[in-house]
Image: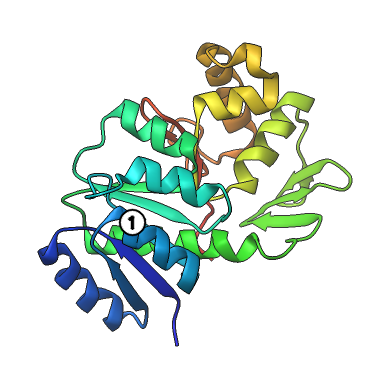
Amino acid sequence: MGAQLLLADDDPQIRRLLKGVFEAEGYSMQIAPDGQVALDRVARSRPDLVLLELQLPIINGYEVCRRIRDWSQVPIIVLTACLSEDAKVTMLDLGADDYVTKPFGVKELLARIRVGLRHGMRLHGDPGAVVHFGTLQIDRARRVVTNDGAELRLTPTEYNLLVLLSGHAGKVLTHRMILRTIWGPHSENDINTLRVFVTQLRRKIEATPGNPRLIVTEPGVGYRFRPPDP
């Protein structure tokens, strides 16, 4: 049996479409037509991942996400047509892991689901002190980063930024969340400083810093660390 997905969406056409897609991929799927049912099924069935529409009846997606995060770290992917930059930031700050806007490509959605499921698996176990992303190796015990076996000279802030982003690989981190974690709550609005350090870090870890593959910008929202394909 594949992973169990919960789709919280009140659109029957979307539900029919995704049911066929998910079953073809080997996933099992539960349906929640409103926010109250979504909360009940997350609590009772413990799905491996939640796909969450924002505009849900009874309890909207924002509140559903907030309540789930009170007690569960299940991966949540927001799936909606109404997602402004402010809405994206709000959902990510509430604890959503990712977002896909409607209309969406099925291949993209399935890729995001696979990343979310991998993130969920990491929550249940320590990946160890040494992690690898292609040729990039991060030794968190010794605070040493190498690429193709050569040690990279990172500043303490660059190292902390890399560990934060890679520790949430595949997940979008908002500017506010990164700034608060690395520099403290007084720096939440200092986006220019963050951009400078991301640029410096890209120069050291990316093969083509002008066309980054690892640290991807999510315009108006934040950054995503995108691991290379195995």
What is the quadrant of residue 186 in the picture? top right
Q: How is the image coloured?
A: rainbow
What is the quadrant of residue 87 in the picture? top left
What is the quadrant of residue 230 in the picture? bottom right
Query: Which residue does the image show at 29% across and 44% down from the upper left?
Result: 60
Query: Which residue does the image show at 19% across and 67% down from the upper left?
Result: 15
Residue 13 screen position, x and y as percent: 10, 65
Q: Amino acid at mark 1?
A: Gln
Neighbourhood count class around disc 1 (C-alpha, 10 Å): few under 14, some 14–19, many 20 upward: some
Query: Which residue does the image show at 84% across and 41% down from the upper left?
Result: 143
Residue 151 screen position, x and y as percent: 79, 41
Compared to 210, does 150 lie above or below? below
Residue 15 as seen in the image, left or right of residue 74: left
Compared to 155, does 135 lie above or below? below
Residue 77 or residue 36, whichever sits in front: 36
Residue 202 as seen in the image, left or right of residue 21: right
Q: Residue furthest left?
A: 13
The N terminus, quarter of image: bottom left
Residue 135 in sight in this render: yes
Residue 170 in sight in this render: no
Residue 223 or residue 35, whichever sits in front: 35
Q: Label 1 belongs to which residue?
A: 36
Secondary structure under the numbered disc 1 in the rendered image:
helix
Residue 29 or residue 188, whichever sits in front: 29
